[in-house]
Image (cartoon, grey):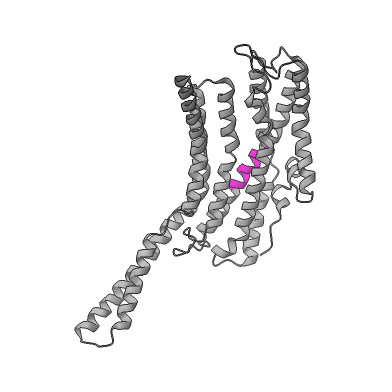
């Protein structure tokens, strides 16, 4: 099977190629990220230091270095670029391992199928351009409104130059952010469409007794887990918003819960088709073993009744079938093991635990001091 190249996943997106192209060295890509996302914050840092707004002691006022939300926002897109890089690598690993868990399909046809779904990822769509534009406009409007009405902050309209530079930075962040999120959605859809097509044509080969405890589909579970990583920066963004302004509102709680539910969706939804197939495969495998056991146990009983002396081979075979059946009963119907599950739980509950811990420690310090 032909190897899938990294650039084939992002070849139609010049913005992502600018940051992730394998034709450039890691040093060049790192410099590009630092220049684009750190040059404005460095200018803002000097301006804030000059105007003495790094820290603001007045009640309700937030200085630049007090503004944890802004500081984290600066690193939002670079962290998402790294996560998307990981997701693309996991996606390629999944594609390369397809021959190991497919059956009844030639390498040529499998290559053609992969090519078709890669085309789906990179196909230029007018509707997609419209969606990107609408998302960009909406978030620009929302952030401009939030900054304009923000009182007592180092980059509020009271500090016009800082306000304008912050808006420019936000525009750059949002523009790249929409490219990353749309590409992620397309990769997820391509993976679902590919596994669905393989499943419907009975090309997926589920191995119930696979030692990886995921029906030989561990690369798929690793890929699905990596999808959830894209939400981690947004969870920490929500937490830094709370730490900056210090108000625990219903809206904030709802946002954290929504992010956690989105994480659950991103992990389980892409595995839905395979889950159905694994349930069916397990049921069929257990039935085949059960039928075999019944057949040989009947033979064993007949041999015993007829006083046949050489029954050890049949008895050992029945015992072996029984052991296999007991092992097969423990076969999971989701393509992941306990290790993957623990990682997933950490992603879902980690930010919530951090917020609850911060609230608990704040209350504790208030009580003690």
Dominant secondary structure (helix, strand or loop) of the stretch shown in magenta: helix
Left-right relation of 214 to 284: right
Tell me if residue 105 comes above or below residue 133 in the rendering. Answer: below
In this rendering, the count of numbered labels is: 0
The quarter of the picture where residue 92 lies is bottom right
The quarter of the picture where residue 164 lies is top right
Q: Is residue 265 visible?
A: no
Q: Is residue 198 visible?
A: yes
Query: Which residue is drawn at the image coordinates 46% and 23% (left, top)?
Result: 363
Left-right relation of 248 to 287: right
Magenta includes 182? yes
Q: Residue 140 in the image: x percent, y percent?
A: 68, 25
Left-right relation of 338 to 300: right
Q: Nearer the viewer, residue 190 or 173?
A: 173
Q: Residue 125 in the image: x percent, y percent?
A: 68, 41
Magenta includes 145? no
Q: Nearer the viewer, residue 5 or 256?
A: 256
Q: Nearer the viewer, residue 275 or 41?
A: 41
The image quadrant where one finds the N terminus is bottom right
Q: Residue 274 in the image: x percent, y percent?
A: 49, 54
Q: Which residues are magenta?
A: 179-189
Q: Nearer the viewer, residue 214 or 127?
A: 214
Q: Residue 369 in the image: x percent, y percent?
A: 48, 19
Tell me if residue 349 comes above or below residue 123 in the rendering. Answer: above
Query: Which residue is drawn at the image coordinates 64% and 39% (left, top)?
Result: 182
């Amino acid at each position: 099977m032909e190897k899938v190249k990294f650039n084939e996943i992002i070849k139609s997106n010049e913005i992502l190629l600018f940051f992730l192209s394998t034709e450039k060295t890691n040093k060049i890509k790192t410099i590009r990220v630092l220049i684009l996302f750190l040059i404005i914050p460095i200018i803002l840092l000097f301006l804030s230091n000059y105007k003495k707004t790094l820290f603001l002691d007045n009640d309700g006022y937030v200085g630049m270095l007090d503004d944890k939300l802004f500081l984290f926002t600066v690193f939002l897109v670079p962290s998402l670029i790294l996560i998307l890089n990981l997701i693309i690598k996991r996606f390629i690993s999944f594609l390369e391992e397809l021959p190991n868990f497919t059956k009844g399909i030639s390498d040529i046809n499998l290559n053609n199928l992969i090519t078709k779904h890669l085309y789906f990822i990179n196909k230029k769509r007018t509707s997609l351009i419209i969606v990107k534009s609408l998302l960009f406009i909406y978030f620009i409007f929302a952030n401009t409104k939030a900054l304009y009405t923000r009182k007592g902050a180092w980059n509020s309209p009271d500090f016009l130059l800082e306000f304008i530079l912050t808006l420019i930075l936000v525009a750059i962040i949002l523009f790249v952010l929409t490219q990353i999120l749309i590409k992620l959605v397309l990769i997820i859809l391509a993976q679902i469409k590919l596994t669905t097509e393989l499943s419907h044509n009975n090309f997926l080969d589920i191995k119930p007794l696979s030692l990886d405890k995921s029906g030989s589909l561990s690369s798929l579970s690793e890929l699905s887990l990596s999808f959830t990583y894209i939400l981690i920066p947004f969870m920490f963004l929500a937490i830094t918003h709370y730490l900056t302004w210090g108000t625990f509102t219903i809206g904030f709680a709802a946002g954290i819960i929504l992010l956690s539910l989105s994480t659950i969706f991103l992990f389980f939804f892409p595995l839905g088709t395979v889950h159905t197939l694994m349930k069916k495969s397990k049921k069929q495998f257990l039935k085949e073993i059960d039928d075999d056991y019944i057949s040989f146990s009947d033979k064993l009983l007949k041999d015993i009744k007829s006083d046949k002396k050489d029954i050890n081979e049949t008895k050992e075979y029945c015992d072996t079938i029984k052991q296999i059946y007991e092992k097969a009963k423990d076969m999971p119907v989701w393509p992941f093991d306990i290790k993957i599950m623990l990682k997933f739980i950490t992603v879902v509950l980690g930010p919530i635990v951090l917020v609850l811990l911060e609230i608990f420690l704040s209350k504790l310090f208030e009580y003690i001091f």
